Image: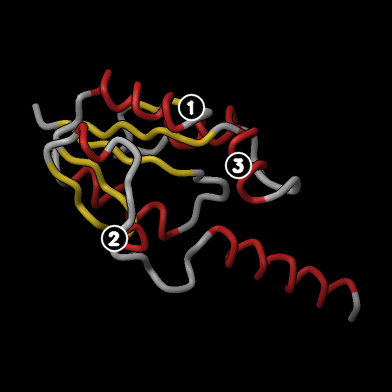
Amino acid sequence: MKRIFTNGSFDVIHSGHLTLLEHARSLGDCLHVAIDSDARIASRKGASRPFHSQQSRAHLLSSIRWVDSVSIFNSDSELEETIKAYAPDVMVVGSDWRGLPIVGGHLVKRIEYFERIPGYSTTAVLASYVSRLSETIYE
């Protein structure tokens, strides 16, 4: 059985996330997704994030057909422990991580870089929502 692993915030699920998850699952027999805890996202992206709670994000991801299991991590060491326990054959990471240190990368047989889809970052999607909402309110 070939195990695939990916991780991230997955704060506001969008088409880019779905394409990543579908691609990741196509590489093997089962896909585990580890998500950043609420506290970890807030410390990295600011007090207004995450938009959705970790329980909500985990539930949503669990319902996606390409995802076989989901876990939540709060630190790099917890992420590494999750990777060790799952023992993936392939870790899928965004192409923006190419050339950068990848937490737990040394624990997997292969790292696969997924090319980001322009315009589909959670930050861009949220900015678009806010912009549209502002236009509606002030019309």
Residue at screen point 8% across, 26% down: 1
Q: Amino acid at mark 2?
A: Arg
Q: Nearer the viewer, residue 43 or 124?
A: 43
Residue 85 image position (x, y, % from top left): 27, 18
Q: Nearer the viewer, residue 130 or 101?
A: 101
Q: Which secondary structure lies at badge 1? A: strand
Task: Tell me if residue 92 comes above or below residue 70 in the rendering.
Answer: below
Q: Amino acid at mark 3?
A: Ile
In terms of sequence position, does the residue under pointer 2 or pointer 1 come before the other?
Answer: 1
In terms of sequence position, does the residue under pointer 1 or pointer 3 come before the other?
Answer: 3
Q: Which secondary structure lies at badge 2? A: loop
Q: Nearer the viewer, residue 100 or 45?
A: 100
Residue on which disc 3 sits: 41
Residue 121 image position (x, y, % from top left): 50, 62
In terms of sequence position, does the residue under pointer 3 or pointer 2 come before the other?
Answer: 3
Q: Nearer the viewer, residue 62 or 35?
A: 35
Q: How is the image coloured?
A: secondary structure
Task: Tell me if residue 15 comes above or below residue 58 in the rendering.
Answer: below
Residue at screen point 39% across, 38% down: 64
Residue on which disc 2 sits: 98
Q: Marks 1 and 3, how far apart in space?
A: 11 Å
Report how many numbered discs are placed on residues in the image.
Answer: 3
Residue on which disc 1 sits: 72
* Pair 2/1: label in front: 2
Q: Are marks 2 and 1 in contact (CB under 8 Å)?
A: no
Q: Amino acid at mark 1?
A: Ile
Where, by quadrant of the figure, is residue 88 drawn?
Answer: top left
Residue 9 image position (x, y, % from top left): 51, 44
Quick one: quadrant of the C terminus?
A: bottom right
Q: Which secondary structure lies at badge 3? A: helix
